[in-house]
Image (cartoon, rainbow, N blue to C red):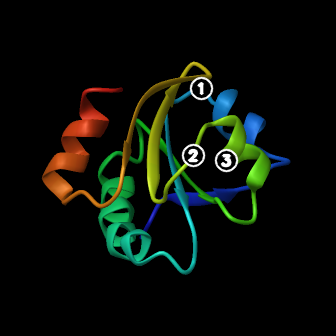
Amino acid sequence: MPNITSTDDAKFSEDVLKATLPVFAMFKSEWCASCKRVTPVVEKLSDDFKDRVKFVHVDAVKNVKASAENNVLAIPTLVIFKNGKESERVTGYFPEPELKAFIERNI
């Protein structure tokens, strides 16, 4: 079962920037084909890393403030935050091995 929560403009700071664990934030949209394609990969990895990483979804279209403040210019944008700061980001679809390596090198 996926270990992912949704956040929005109002809760982004609390859910992501003030989190005690590293946070994997996926900025996405309902209409985005690449987002739909990467979501099952992210869901699986959320289970694999459930005790070490917090996973959140942000609807980039509905949450313009969080998207703008984090320079999200394309979706999906996948960002790792540690101690309230961006560690690394990637944009687009990535297969599971590459996304797992992305997470591992940033936690």
Residue for point 25% across, 33% down: 104
Position of 4 compared to 12: left or right? left
Task: Give the percent coordinates (x, y) of residue 69.
Answer: 71, 36
Task: Give the percent coordinates (x, y) of residue 27.
Answer: 55, 55
Residue for point 41% across, 76% down: 36
Residue 22 seen from this side: no
In the image, which disc is placed on residue 72? 2
Residue for point 48% across, 59% down: 75
Please tell me in which quadrant of the rendered image residue 57 appears.
Answer: bottom right
**Quadrant position of the C terminus in the picture:** top left
Q: Is residue 33 above or below residue 2?
A: below
Residue 72 seen from this side: yes
Residue for point 80% across, 46% down: 11
Q: Are marks 2 and 3 in contact (CB under 8 Å)?
A: yes
Q: Earlier in the sequence, mark 3 or mark 1?
A: 1
Mark 1 lies on residue:
20
Please tell me in which quadrant of the rendered image residue 7 appears.
Answer: bottom right
Mark 3 vs mark 1, CA separation in Å: 21 Å
Mark 1 vs mark 2, CA separation in Å: 23 Å
Q: Is residue 46 above or below residue 61?
A: above
Q: Amino acid at mark 3?
A: Ser
Mark 3 lies on residue:
67
Task: Label 2: state its secondary structure.
Answer: loop
Q: Earlier in the sequence, mark 2 or mark 3?
A: 3
Please name which of the two marks, 3 or 1, marks the residue nearer to the observer: 3
In the image, which disc is placed on residue 53? none
Mark 2 vs mark 3, CA separation in Å: 5 Å
Task: Label 3: state its secondary structure.
Answer: helix
Q: Amino acid at mark 2?
A: Val
Task: Give the percent coordinates (x, y) of residue 84.
Answer: 62, 22
Q: Earlier in the sequence, mark 1 or mark 2?
A: 1
